[in-house]
Image (cartoon, rainbow, N blue to C red):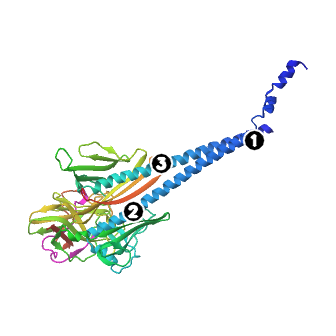
Amino acid sequence: MKKDEIQKIKDSPARVARAGGGFGVIEIVVVVAVAAAALVGFLQVGVAALRLLKADRSSLEATLLAREGLDATRSARDESWANIASLTASQSPSARYYPVVQNGKWVLAVSSPGLINGMYDRYIQVERVARNGYDDIVLSGGTDDSGTRKVTAHASSTAGDVVVSTYLTNFQSYLTPSADAVSVSYTSAATDGAISGFSFPSQNAGDGDPAQSFTTGSDIRVTRISAYMRRATTAPSDIYAQIRPTAAGAVLGTSQIVGGVTISTTSPAWVDFYFSPPVSLAAGTYTMRLRSIPDSATAGSGSAGSVYWQYTLQNPSGPYAGGTARKAVGYLGNPADQGQQLDQYDFGFKVYASQ
Amino acid sequence: METVVYVALLGLTTSFFVNSFVQIASVYSRARAEREVLSNARTTLEAVTDAISSARAVYAPTSRFNTDAGQVSLVTDDDTVISGEPSVYTDFWVDGGRIFERKEGGSAIPLSASSVRVSEFRAERIVQALGRESVKMTIRMDAASDRYPASVTLNATTALRGNY
């Protein structure tokens, strides 16, 4: 064999690789395994981060619901301390109360409204508070403080139970509250049903609105109107009230909206429609008109009913001498339509004026 | 024969790595979507509830309550206004899937990012008693991209207390 042929064999890649140890299958397998492990690690970190974020989301939703439970209780306290004090009259700290919006305001119900957002069971518990001789709150012993309650709100789900608590005091007993009083009313309405041939809110038919006129003998500033009503269907449209000189006259005041689903369904109740700012009325006759969202006076608007505004039918004229009921006001979108006057009917109402 | 085995192994390995990369990218995108939705909803709700708590009154004529695309208009006492006008009007509303804020005389400022879509901005005015008013807010946000779904619904009730 020639010398250059021998050198060519020595320089072949396979020989060089074998001679130098090479980059073999074992190394490749190790590198691939390390890379795979790193990838799986990254994936696990990502999955864990996703799980933590979802837990964070649930925790935030639950915490806000629990805090809202405290705010609802605070609102009930702002309305009247009796709303809170009465919860512990039987002194059962384990009793659960469920904050729900009913008749347009927060109430603490004894029965559960069901899961919120299909996930969270929210309720509050109220405990009595005792103080020692230095007015410090003590966990045992001490003297009962009738003007303080400990409120604990829970929002529980399958992910856990979020608990927040606070102390509420009856500090408003030291303040002079804004006051209003009934100025004009008809409170004896007892017929629980719809006036014949008329449903409110209209079932998408544009049948118009109900109204009741009233007379004030002096100048007043109307803070709210209460209507005596009951929800007759599962989800009627939201409603609000307006004050006008006549049923189709210019709007003098518009109340806040009361959620249709929040109106009591078991028995009639006084539903408050507040006017902010109050509506100033000179002595005379005016009309309160209930409206709905979507609009009951517009056919095809999507309005759905119904709510029963309690009334009295009396011959030959209605029992309230200062006004009469009306139905189908604004029928089929006609803003000038005063509807049908019902001389023998009166709806139950109260008109409150500031003191 | 060896070549076939090597090619098969190479294919399997490549497939594993590609699939892993896709999975990682997907998980991190979903996590990012969750984080975007969560942080946007949290900060937006805080901005709205802070404004409500310091407001003196709700300005009803331009507010839209009890609807999923609501608007809240607030009247806030502000003694720092140079013009001497003691009240400042602030609006919050949803448009094109984003929540905006505008203070009187200013321009609209988006509170939520374009990476999320506001599907519910519902305000409910609750009057508990004379002079005792609060606003119940419900904000639902979804990821703007349908590819990585993420959603959060936050509730808060805030009493109007004025500047105290």
Viewer-nearest of labels 3 and 1?
1
Residue B64 seen in the current view = no
**Disc 3 target residue:** B33
Task: Assign the C terminus of chain B to one quadrant of the image.
Answer: bottom left
Question: From this viewpoint, which residue is outermost toward the right?
Answer: A1
Q: Can residue B69 be found in the magenta stretch?
A: no
Q: Same subunit under labels 3 and 2? A: no
Residue type, mark 3 in image: Ala
In front of the other: A295 or B121: B121
| Cα gap from disc 3 to disc 1, whole angstroms | 41 Å
What range is drawn magenta here? A308-333
Q: Check residue A26 in the rendering and tell me which mark sits there, or answer none.
A: 1
Residue B129 seen in the current view = yes
**Disc 2 target residue:** A65
Residue shown at the point (28%, 58%) measured from the top left: A295
The subunit letter for the residue under badge 3 reads: B
Q: Can residue A318 be found in the magenta stretch?
A: yes
Find residue B18 and report its image quarter: top right
| Cα gap from disc 1 to disc 2, whole angstroms | 58 Å
In-image side of B110 versus A212 (left or right): right
| Cα gap from disc 3 to disc 2, whole angstroms | 23 Å
